[in-house]
Amino acid sequence: NAGVTQTPKFQVLKTGQSMTLQCAQDMNHEYMSWYRQDPGMGLRLIHYSVGAGITDQGEVPNGYNVSRSTTEDFPLRLLSAAPSQTSVYFCASTPAPGAPYEQYFGPGTRLTVT
Amino acid sequence: AQSVTQLGSHVSVSEGALVLLRCNYSSSVPPYLFWYVQYPNQGLQLLLKYTTGATLVKGINGFEAEFKKSETSFHLTKPSAHMSDAAEYFCAVSEDMGRRALTFGSGTRLQVQP
């Protein structure tokens, strides 16, 4: 199993550009989440999904869109990048309730918006 | 709503000294509690977790934490610090049901002095 994979590892965008951060897992986990990490603020939840076709907002959703067309993939879209979105982004997956609680994180994507 | 407070954004100890990193949480339901470690420019690594059962939890690298419901605390300890323990440590809380996503504290950077 590859676990949770994220691409790209690094990205530089100009203000106003759009892009998609990719996340995939091969563990058949129902639950997936996106977090952003900023200095002094820990990780904050952007969006999450409890299954294919079901997504919802976390604490800091503005400026981001997600979709979940398959169990495996959970892409994060930046519609119009802003310098405030400079951050490290982590994707995570978790089995559904009833299964032992394990949270698996991807390696992260470091995004810089100039 | 759940939340996590980590007391002390920076902690400095001498090599061989006790490590104590403090974490207090709030949750409306019985929580799942986690400690993660992050080394520079790396992803998150799970140190230990409490879900149910024994309240003293042992993790990797000699770390342990005790869940104290009456104090709403989950402090991380290690009897003897090693230089390789220098990193940032994050406490996190989650509920088993619902979105099964983590709420993180702001992190504590541990320095180990020779």
Image (cartoon, rainbow, N blue to C red):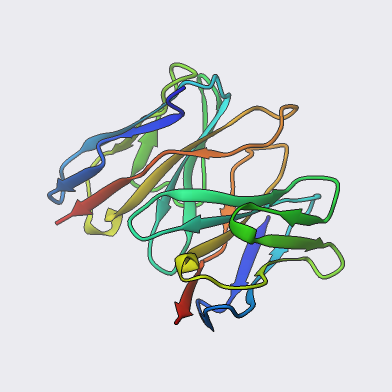
Residue A3 percent coordinates (x, y): 46, 28
Residue A45 percent coordinates (x, y): 49, 48
Q: Is residue B7 above or below residue B91?
A: below
Residue A52 percent coordinates (x, y): 52, 19
Farthest residue, direction top? A70
Q: Which residue is at a point 51% across and 57% down the rendered structure image?
A: B37
Q: Which residue is at a point 48% across and 54% down the rendered structure image?
A: A44
Residue B70: name its quadrant.
bottom right
Q: Which residue is at a point 56% across and 73% down the rendered structure image?
A: B81
Toward the viewer: B19 or A4?
B19
Q: If the image is split into quadrants, where does the C terminus of chain B sit?
A: bottom left
Q: Is residue A36 above or below residue B82?
A: above
Left or right: residue B9 versus residue B28 is left
Left or right: residue A89 versus residue B27 is left
Left or right: residue A72 versus residue B18 is left
Residue B39: name its quadrant.
bottom left
Q: Is residue B50 above or below residue A106?
A: below
Left or right: residue B21 versus residue A86 is right
Q: If the image is split into quadrants, where does the N terminus of chain B sit?
A: bottom right
Q: Is residue A108 above or below residue A3?
A: below
Residue A75 percent coordinates (x, y): 36, 30
Please tell me how many numbered marks the rendered image carries: 0
Residue A6: name its quadrant.
top left
Toward the viewer: B22 or A77?
B22
